[in-house]
């Protein structure tokens, strides 16, 4: 700690005693010495300087600046007063004068360790961050000697900080509970509401910013290509509307919302330029005023603001195995005038000897959009409209200036479809006149993917809130309506390799009807049943075990015992391990034919270091899956699955609405191929919040919020007001990933057969093994995996080519059936 003279400290002490402050003001940045101790990770491009802007009290604040760096810049100060024993919270007053959100990580502590908290600075805003100081016992609070601020990489850092204050217990500011609430005041919170002099300063700052922003936009529009006159007229009109909207703003939130739209108007201008740039290679009718492009199914074509990243071509080529589905997208992007009454049609695809791809399995669906209002997690860079549900709508669609509309063209081959090339055409029309057409070539492979998921899966469909879905029916009509549509739902789920199951269903004494056994038998008869959960277990009493008997007896009656399992003690800690063991031991004695008793409890030793010896299935979250230990556990007959849920976020793949589509495909495909779990669990597919279903399209009224703070978690499907079950672009990629995994498992099966044949084909084996091992090239780890869709397709083709070149004719490792224990692929 640097000692300061009493004279130097006097202004700071007076400031701390001033009624304007609550608590002890550690830094008010009114004196030169308060800037002396700041050190930088990159001093050549970083600085902390006094500024007359955005001072909370006094005359100055501290401006923190860093040029964009490939690594996160750090600012560190040695704390002049290091005795924090009497303080429990720290307060930071921060202002972000830029259009970019800035996320900071603040660490306070000793030389040994410290406490870190994050602060998100909204654009063009002032906030006050209050954080509880949650020091570990290793931190000596009488010797706090550093404050470190870590700023984002690859972004210009520019923010202002004033009045770093320490609070004792009971001192304000405190987030007081509202009248009548029974909650305690929060100790960590953010206040975004601007008040007093700061409100006046921020209002003046944003007003001046708006004037300058509008001038820059006008200049940009004037410099755009002369061939975009229609786009320029649209942009100028939109800008003037936003200027008027800003001038009429009555509060800070309205100002910031309008400034965000101004920022996005520049993005829209660049989208028009993107569309114009496509024309050099475009063979469609240019005078239509819009361009038609293509996109892979692993791409989310954003409807507004962000680059469309379309492919301009005259043809499309895809390959399919028998029983497989793949898709591509057709997108319409206006650049000179709106696209009116657009339709997209897929013609018949004809192949060898008069064979065709089934019209019932192929087709075109409209991509619809759901609006996010927050980020699922901080790395996401866009809040707004995202592609999600697919709707079978044939009516013409208008596409406004500045928007992009996509259609999902799904291609499918029946099982045992005649191998060879199939050709057809996709036609895009506006007001009944053809604007663009594509030659479509589908290469059908000479093998099939399975009718069901290639490994056991446990995904919930019927549970929690289905009876709340008024799109299906009200209290009086729901049951009757559900009976009329449930088989259609079961079929549609099966198309995505998902069974109508629930890991959360509760068994009830003497009742057999908490499982829909008609659906179980229906799927079993069709060869699509994989798993059926007999119920969720919790407790240790004998009568708790006995609750499962009706379901057990019914499963025996139907001959589906190899498909049944039980699940329980969801994500529980070690204090429940003895209870899990007690229940499992009793259950196995009563129902020995049930092969799988599974939990997601936090026993990451898989039973080696816990009392759970009677349990047969462990399901760790993907970030805690231990392949080496899993292999040892399997030697003892234990099943080791893995699961994902709302956690973990990036860099792990996950299914969120505001994540790329490729996440879903990698997660259920290459990721499972690399780590080879015995099964995959996901807690829900229809945790809906829009119970009345979608009533508008393509910009829908569907609520993407599911688990608090996330978009799309637990919701692979949507529903419309007519109770039609709607797949999302995410579940399409989930199924595509399982089909990729099927390729891997087929080739693995053929390698085993050839190795045991007595006459192995060494040349083929070498190339086939190389194809399997190539998984490691694309999935280096659970947090390092390819984001390149071309690599996914190349690897898929590599596997398929090896299968078709195989000396083994058997390409069906599931031919003898697959139950809850899966097939031997480990």
Image (cartoon, rainbow, N blue to C red):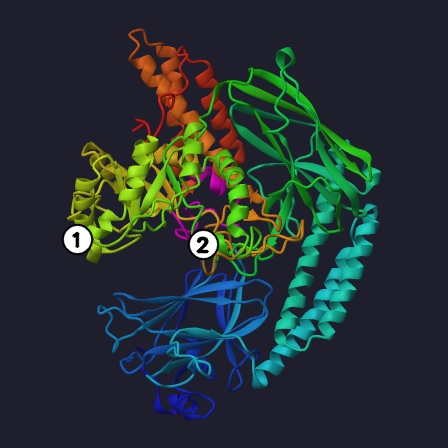
Identify whether 814 is placed above or below 464: above
| Span shown in magenta | 644-667
Identify whether 394 is placed above or below 575: above
Front-most of residues 338 and 599: 599
Instruction: Give left or right: position of 412 versus 171.
Output: right
Which residue is the site of mark 1?
578
Q: Quadrant of residue 682?
A: top left
User: Which sits earlier in the primary sequence, circle 2 or circle 1?
Assistant: 2
Which residue is the site of mark 2?
71
Q: Quadrant of the N terminus?
A: bottom left
Mark yes or no: residue 821 visible. Answer: no
Identify whether 818 is placed above or below 613: above
Front-most of residues 398 and 250: 398
Q: Position of residue 154 (x, y in %)?
A: 51, 54
Give the label on residue 79, or none: none
Q: CA gap, disc 2 to disc 1?
A: 47 Å
Q: Position of residue 585 (x, y in %)?
A: 17, 44
Q: Quadrant of residue 618?
A: top left
């Amino acid at each position: 700690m640097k000692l300061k003279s009493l004279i130097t400290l006097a202004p700071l002490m007076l400031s701390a005693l001033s009624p304007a402050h609550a608590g002890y003001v550690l830094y008010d940045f009114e004196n030169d010495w308060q800037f002396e101790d700041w050190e930088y990770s990159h001093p050549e491009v970083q600085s902390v300087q006094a500024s007359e802007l955005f001072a909370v009290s006094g005359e100055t604040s501290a401006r923190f600046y860093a040029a964009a760096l490939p690594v996160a810049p750090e600012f560190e100060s040695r704390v002049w007063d290091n005795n924090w024993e009497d303080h429990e919270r720290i307060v930071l007053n921060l202002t972000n004068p830029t259009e970019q959100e800035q996320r900071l990580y603040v660490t306070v502590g000793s030389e040994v360790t410290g406490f870190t908290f994050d602060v998100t600075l909204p654009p063009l805003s002032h906030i006050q961050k209050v954080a509880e100081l949650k020091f570990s016992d290793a931190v000596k609070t009488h010797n706090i000697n550093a404050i470190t601020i870590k700023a984002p990489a690859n972004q210009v850092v520019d923010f202002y900080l004033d009045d770093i204050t320490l609070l004792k217990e009971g001192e304000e500011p405190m987030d007081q509970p509202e009248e009548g609430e029974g909650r305690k005041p929060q100790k960590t919170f953010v206040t975004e509401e601007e008040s007093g002099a700061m409100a006046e300063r921020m209002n003046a700052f944003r007003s001046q910013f708006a004037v300058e922003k509008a001038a820059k936009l006008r200049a940009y529009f004037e410099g755009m290509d002369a061939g975009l006159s229609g786009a320029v007229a649209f942009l100028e009109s939109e800008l003037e509307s936003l200027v008027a909207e800003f001038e009429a703003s009555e509060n800070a939130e309205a100002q910031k919302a309008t400034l965000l739209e101004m920022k996005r108007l520049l993005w829209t201008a660049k989208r028009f330029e993107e569309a114009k740039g496509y024309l050099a290679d475009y063979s469609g009718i240019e005078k239509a005023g819009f361009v038609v492009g293509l996109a892979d199914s692993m791409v989310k074509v954003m409807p507004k603001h962000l680059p469309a990243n379309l492919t301009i071509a005259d043809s499309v080529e895809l390959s399919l195995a028998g029983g497989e589905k793949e898709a591509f997208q057709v997108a319409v992007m206006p650049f000179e005038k709106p696209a009116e009454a657009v339709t997209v049609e897929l013609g018949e695809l004809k192949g060898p000897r008069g064979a065709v791809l089934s019209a019932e399995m192929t087709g075109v669906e409209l991509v619809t959009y759901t609006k996010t209002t927050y980020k699922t997690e901080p790395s996401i860079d866009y809040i707004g409209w995202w592609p999600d549900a697919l709707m079978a709508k044939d009516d013409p669609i208008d596409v406004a200036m500045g928007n992009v509309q996509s259609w999902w063209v799904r291609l499918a081959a029946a099982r045992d479809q005649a191998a060879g090339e199939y050709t057809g055409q996709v036609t895009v029309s506006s007001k009944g006149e053809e604007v663009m057409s594509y030659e479509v070539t589908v290469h059908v492979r000479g093998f099939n993917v399975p009718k069901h998921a290639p490994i056991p899966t446990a995904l919930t469909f019927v549970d929690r809130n289905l009876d709340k879905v008024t799109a299906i029916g009200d209290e009086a009509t729901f049951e009757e309506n559900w009976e009329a549509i449930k088989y259609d739902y079961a079929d549609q789920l099966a198309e995505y390799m998902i069974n109508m199951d629930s890991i959360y269903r509760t068994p009830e004494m003497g009742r057999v009807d908490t499982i829909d056994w008609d659906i179980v038998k229906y799927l079993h008869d069709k060869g699509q049943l994989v798993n059926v959960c007999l119920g969720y277990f919790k407790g240790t009493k004998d009568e708790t075990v006995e609750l499962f008997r009706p379901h057990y007896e019914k499963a025996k009656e139907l001959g589906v015992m190899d498909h049944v399992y039980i699940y329980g003690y969801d994500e529980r800690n070690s204090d429940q391990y003895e209870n899990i063991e007690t229940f499992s031991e009793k259950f196995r004695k009563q129902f020995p034919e049930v092969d799988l008793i599974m939990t997601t409890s936090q026993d990451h030793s898989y039973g080696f270091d816990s009392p759970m010896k009677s349990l047969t299935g462990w399901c760790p979250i993907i970030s805690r899956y231990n392949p080496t230990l899993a292999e040892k556990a399997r030697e003892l007959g234990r099943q080791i699955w893995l699961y994902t849920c709302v956690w973990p976020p990036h860099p792990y793949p996950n299914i969120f609405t505001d994540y790329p589509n490729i996440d879903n495909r990698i997660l259920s495909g290459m990721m499972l191929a690399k780590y080879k779990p015995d099964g995959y669990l996901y807690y829900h597919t229809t945790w809906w919040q829009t119970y009345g279903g979608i009533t508008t399209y393509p910009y829908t009224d569907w609520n993407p919020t599911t688990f608090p703070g996330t978009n799309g978690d637990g919701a692979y499907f949507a529903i419309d007001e007519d109770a039609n079950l709607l797949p999302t672009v995410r579940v399409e990629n989930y199924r595509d990933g399982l089909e990729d995994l099927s390729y891997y498992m087929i080739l693995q099966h053929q390698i085993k057969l050839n190795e045991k044949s007595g006459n192995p084909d060494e040349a083929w084996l070498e190339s086939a093994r190389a194809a399997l091992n190539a998984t490691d090239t694309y999935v280096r780890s659970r947090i390092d995996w390819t984001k390149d869709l071309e690599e996914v397709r190349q690897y898929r083709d590599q596997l398929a080519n090896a299968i078709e070149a195989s000396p083994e004719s058997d390409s069906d490792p599931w031919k003898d059936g697959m139950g809850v224990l899966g097939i031997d692929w480990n």
